[in-house]
Image: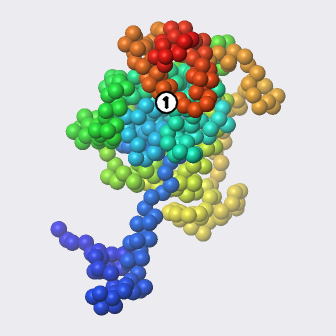
Amino acid sequence: MKKKKLTTASGRPYFENEDSMTVGPRGPILLQDYYLHEKLAHFNRERIPERIVHAKGTGAYGKFTVTGNITRYTKAKLFSKVGNKCRAFVRFSTVGGEKGSADTERDPRGFAVKFYTEDGNWDLVGNNTPVFFIKDPKKFPDFVHTQKRDPKTNLKSATMMWDFWSLNPESLHQVMILFSDRGTPDGYRFMNGYGSHTFSMINKKNERIWVKFHFKTQQGIKTLTGPQAEELKGKDPDYAQRDLVEAISKKNFPKWTLKIQVMNDEQAKKFKWNPFDITKVWSHKDFPLIEVGVMELNEIPENYYANVEQAAFAPAHVIDGIGLSPDKLLQGRILAYPDAHRYRLGANYEQLPVNRPIVSVHHHQRDGFMSLENKSGSGPNYYPNSFDDIVADKSYKEPSMKLDSNIVDSYDRNLKDDDHYSQPGKLFRKVMNEQQRKNTVSNFVNSMKGISGPKKKEIIIRQLNHFYKADKELALSVAKGLGIKY
């Protein structure tokens, strides 16, 4: 095999890769040793800013195959016929921990999918839970701060978490899931994924329908108990990443079945709750799951940094036939995610190979840090113009979306959206079995024992009151575990 010459980044072959240029064998280093500067300067810049959330994760490439006919709901080319396939990339992650945190922390798991379609990239950016802690994006920075470190001690704080949750009862549904065994999945292969938000689909008649996306693991659900997760944190903090890499390396390719729930406008108007409230789920009995396709992960990226660390997903990236909704948190994420990527990776993050669509792109954005493309050459950087042949295709225009009101308001007056207890209570009583309920109570008790400070009792009682409204036995069991008369 022909040897490759060692070169600088500019392509100049060189030899002195291990020894700095000095004045004599013991003398000081010369300023002119450029490659010493290049090596050290590049080393100092090898880390881009860590993601504020979802900092630690793993990823894999694979394929998505359409298995169900949903052309009555969407005109997306991907779903135009059964058997269609496209390449996909998935990034799994924990949410609140730093890049060096353990994979088995009690935390939601990010489940972000990038479909490389013939109509551009479609990013379905969700979690392993169908709901979330909050429904208004203004609360998101505050919520994340409570999951990070105390600004004084720089330690994780149960007091901060439970103070916020107890002051925001809308969080109870997600908190209930988080402190069940589902909060500590046994790796990434044995959990479901959800788009979580309500999205929309648009068909060839320009009719819009509301939709929720579910990835059901074909490996079956497997979870860890609290003690098992704690033990693995010390034994193998990279447990979930190792499991995924080893499974794919052995050609034990994990698969998920993509299913959807659909709801029309009339059903949305009559729905018991706001259908765009991410703290609520849609009943599978009333809105049954419809099979759409199968996703298989079969390729570990050659370079983690290039493909996983630089992967950028955004709910704003939808394709023709897939649309958004009035979901408040989704509306906030449409702004926040691309902005986060511009901060971490630069304005041209979509030119990076992992984020680059498989189709040609034509627009009038130019320049900025790390602009890799020059396909437009000397063409104009404005629109409309008289020189290039880029046109806006009217066939891709989305139909209008009806809104409930034309009154501008900064809060929700719909009192039925204040029911934060029915679904968490049903989850605890009817979905969990007896052992799962015991584990959930134990997990609550162990976490709430960490609440400290002068407001300790106030925070605990406030949270117990929320538990009581969801399920009396839950509240009494947690109070007993904490040694509190309630």
- Residue drawn 22% across and 39% down? 250
Q: Quadrant of residue 19?
A: bottom left
**Can residue 62 be seen at all in this image of the molecule?**
no
Where does the image place residue 185, in percent across and percent down from the top left?
37, 28
- Residue drawn 37% across and 13% down? 435
| In this picture, residue 109 sits left or right of residue 366 | left
Q: In this figure, which residue is indicated by the disc labeled 1?
A: 450
**Can residue 60 be seen at all in this image of the molecule?**
yes
- Residue drawn 43% across and 62% down? 46
Taking 58 as reference, is 14 above or below it? below
Q: Quadrant of residue 234?
A: top left
Q: Residue furthest bottom?
A: 24
| In this picture, residue 45 sits left or right of residue 454 | left
The amino acid sitting under disc 1 is Gly
Q: Between residue 182 and residue 259, name the one nearer to us.
A: 182
Q: Quadrant of the C terminus?
A: top right
Q: Quadrant of the N terminus?
A: bottom left
- Residue drawn 41% across and 43% down? 101
Where does the image place residue 82, in percent across and percent down from the top left?
41, 28
Binning the other alpha carbons within 10 Å of mark 1 as few (below 14), some (14 to 19) or many (20 upward) gives few
Where does the image place residue 209, in percent across and percent down from the top left?
61, 24
Q: Between residue 417 and residue 289, name the one nearer to us.
A: 417
Taking 353 as reference, is 387 above or below it? below
Q: Between residue 197 and residue 436, name the one nearer to us.
A: 436
Q: Residue furthest left?
A: 1
Where does the image place residue 177, in percent across and percent down from the top left?
48, 22
Circle 1: element type: loop
Count of all numbered marks drawn on residues in the image: 1
Q: Between residue 448 and residue 104, name the one nearer to us.
A: 448
